[in-house]
Each structure stands twice: as C-alpha cells, then as structure tokens.
Image: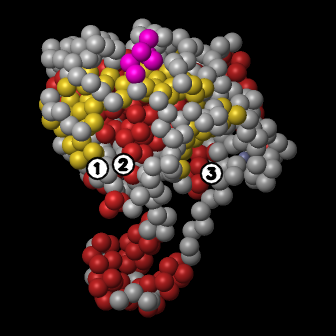
Amino acid sequence: LPFGNTKQVGVTILVSDATASLPSVQHTAWMLVNLLGRFQGVVHRLSVRCPAGVKLCGRVVPLATRDVDLATALIDGGNAIGVVPIEKDLQLERTIAIGTGPFATAADLFVLGDGWCGGISVTPESFDTLDLHSSLPFGPYVAACIAAAEVFKAARMRPGHFISPTSAFYSCWNHVASDAPISGGPSDVEVVLDASLVGIGAVGSSVVHAIWASPNIAGSMVLIDNDPKGLETTNLNRYPLFGTASVGQQKATAAARVASDAKVRWIPHDAAIESFDLVTLRVVSAVDRNSARAAIQFKYPARLFSGSTLDLRAEVLRCGPPGVGACLRCFNEPEKIAPDDVLRSKLKGANESEIAELARTAEITIDQATEWIATGRCGIAGDRLLPLLRRDDGEDAFAVAFVSVMAGTMLASELVKDHLADAAPLSESQPRVTFQFFSPLARSNQASAFRRDPNCPMCDPNSAACRIWAKRYQSVSKSKT
Ligand SMILES: [Zn+2]
C-alpha cells in the first residue's frame, strides 16, 4: 500500500505470568518489543503487560540497565530506542501473547521460540511441543521476526497479496519451515570465537545482538565499520542494537560499548576493510555494497559467511568450498564508481539553491562549489563534494528491521554451527538459505545448493588465489574433527 494508506495499529505485548522467568520467553518478548518499537508509521503505540518482579535471566535487553526486572527492562529498553512510544499495561487494538498460558486476557497471536526454532500461532496449544529448556536467543528472535512481519503485512499490504498462516515455525538449526515446532540442535553451545564482522549496519548489529545474548559464546570478535557519518537517527528504525543514546557515534565503537558485558571480547575498528589484515579464522560479511563484498573476498579468509536482505527476504551464504561453491564476489558485480567529470557535469544543471545546499553540507563556500563544478579546480571543494555525490549514487533499498534481524540471527547461528562437528546445513552441499516473509511456510524457505559464478574473477579454481583460499579453508575442516 502507499505509505499514506498504512493501517496503523497499536499493539499490546502480553507476557505470560506462568513462564515469564524463562529465557525463551524473555528473549522473545524483548525482540518483539525491539522490532515493533522501531516500526515508525506502522505501529503508532506499543504497550507491555508483564508481571512485575521477574528477574532477568542473563543478557536480554541491551538498552536497559542490567539490574531491573523484566517488565521495567522491556519498557525502558523500548523507550531507549526513541521511535514508537511504549507504555505499561494499556489495552490496545491488537494483543500478541508471549509464553504459554493461561493468559490474563484474550490475544489474537501467540509467539514463542526456544533454542534454534521459533514461530507464531493463533492458538497457544501449538507451542505444547516446543521444549523450553534453552537459553539461546536464536529461536526466540526468529519467532519475534515472523510475528513482526505479520503486523507489517496486515498494516502495509493489500489483503490477498500475502499469506498469513494460522501457524508458522522456522528452525535455523536445520533450516526447515513447518506449521509445528521443529526439534533439533543442542540447547546450549560453548564456542570460543576467533572471528571478524564487517559492516555494523542493520544486519551486522543483529549479529552482535544475538552473540551478546548467547550465554556461552566466548573468544573475540573484531567489529569493522567505516561509515564516517556514524549512527544516524534515520538508522534507528532498523538497527536492533541501538537507541538514541548512540546517535552520532561510530558504529563499531558504539556496538562494542552497548554490548560490552558480552562473554565475547569485541575489538572495534571504525575504518575501512581495505586497511586491515583480516587474520581471524572466520569472517562474517554484513555489508550492503558489492564493492565492499569484493574487498572482503580479496582477503580470502578461511571461512566466510555473508548475510543480506532484499525487500522481505533474508539470505545467508556460507562461502565455498573454494572453486566449487560461491564466493562473496560471485554474482555480485561491484558498483561502478562514476568518474569525477561525470558527477560534475550532472551538477551543471543544478539551480542556485541546490548548489547552496550542497555547499553547506560539504562545509565549503558557494563560490568554491561553483568554481569546482565549472572547472574541476579547487582541491578542497572536490575532496569534500565527491564523497557526498558518490554516497547519493546508491540509494538505500527498501528495508525493514525484522528482515535484517532474521538475516543477522541466521548469520550468528551459522557462525556458531560452523564450530560443531554434527551441525546441520548450511554445509558444502547446501551452503545458502533464503527466508522470505510473504509466505513463511513456502518451500523455498530452506537451505539449498549454490554453485560458484563461472564468470567470477576471484574464485577461479585454476587461480593461485583460489588455491591459497582452499588451503586455508581446509585447515579449518581439520581442526573441527
Ligand atoms: Zn567467486
């Protein structure tokens, strides 16, 4: 629907009295508050009904102080986002219940995840077969994403243009969608990371969030992001780790600060990937430009995972095996960088007020801008204007938070699974998964084969670079067994 025709909705999130103390319920509740609390223009108001005095079970709400009870953390954390107002104990148009019953009031949707699997249902009985023993955040975050998508679809899409199943579950252990909970995967994992994460945007900050909330993921993770503008207010509707307090800060440093009490040690770098020797065993790509993907692939790390989003679809790729499965550069033609004089000649048609605005943003005088447009001379004007002009070249695609969190959650779970000898795909034969929210039970929501791009210049099996990559790749396989 056109944005002006959005059927905005107020949502009450109802947390079960009986099960509010469980990690599964707490992780699900927070991620749903976190996602709906960023839904500018879709959710006009959010309310939390949660029993008082329930102790937080570990790291659940990064945006609240750690020593408050669950109800306070959900409301304080939600309000720290600063997008949708969140109040206590109001009854709004829609009620979404989290946990298992009995519930104080009726609800139109039930949401819960545990371990690696999570989902939604219109009846609470659907969750009877879901084990509630795990402290992992993956299944709970999947559940919250599927629920947030249903709120989005009802508000923004024409009836009949999407499918709202009466129940839908997804497991990021075996990448299966079903109308009932899916078992599989250990209820806890102890992993010592030696990894890097490139791109601390919507997907990357979701990865940090999931790793932070996992009780036994230790080791170290390098965080890399070179966006000179840092976190902007307009990012808050999609970046699940950040609230207004982080606006203006560099993203890698801000993520390390918000998640500083994780078991893993963060090593933030607010600089470009090109300036690093990526020496970690595993690298996670959460960048959104193909030129950045090529720069990461150029380092040929032993293991490489990539997450991306497109409209209502999340995608995760485990790169390799080298020369057989796709690399990060495969099918990802780097964006062409427009030459300086092309950008200049585009500006020759601009009017006075457009040039004045551009000069103000670049912090140069109008005379300097005009001189540079006319002649290409004036070094300072060129240095300041060119990055601005190139930035506006690649318009941000349509994106919503639940798709980014789904991609980030699947990425984090694949990074963990790659340490486990008996893990289900993603694997060499099924290295790629896509999940689209239009129809959560679609058969295409699963892991599948993905061969390399025969025209890719970076993973040609006969190249020296690919042979080096293969050697590094195989060294990880051996240490796994
Ligand atoms: Zn390739």
Q: Position of residue 268 (x, y in %)?
A: 39, 38
Relative image position of residue 314 (x, y in whole percent)? 53, 41
On the rendered image, what quadrant is the N terminus found in? Answer: bottom left
- Magenta segment boundaries in residue numbering: 123-128
Marks 2 and 3, Cα distance to the nearest angstrom?
38 Å
Q: SS class of the residue under badge 3?
A: helix
Q: Name the amino acid, label 2.
A: Ala
The reply to whether callout 2 and callout 1 are in contact (CB within 8 Å) is: yes
| Camera-nearest residue between 81 and 325 | 81
Give the quadrant of residue 449.
top right
Q: Residue at x 24, y 39 (%)?
A: 93
Q: Give the residue at the far right of this rendering.
A: 462
**Is residue 5 visible to us here?**
yes
Task: Using the image as rendered, state which of residue 140 and residue 99 is in the foreground.
Answer: 99
Residue located 32% across and 51% down the image: 7
Residue corresponding to mark 2:
155
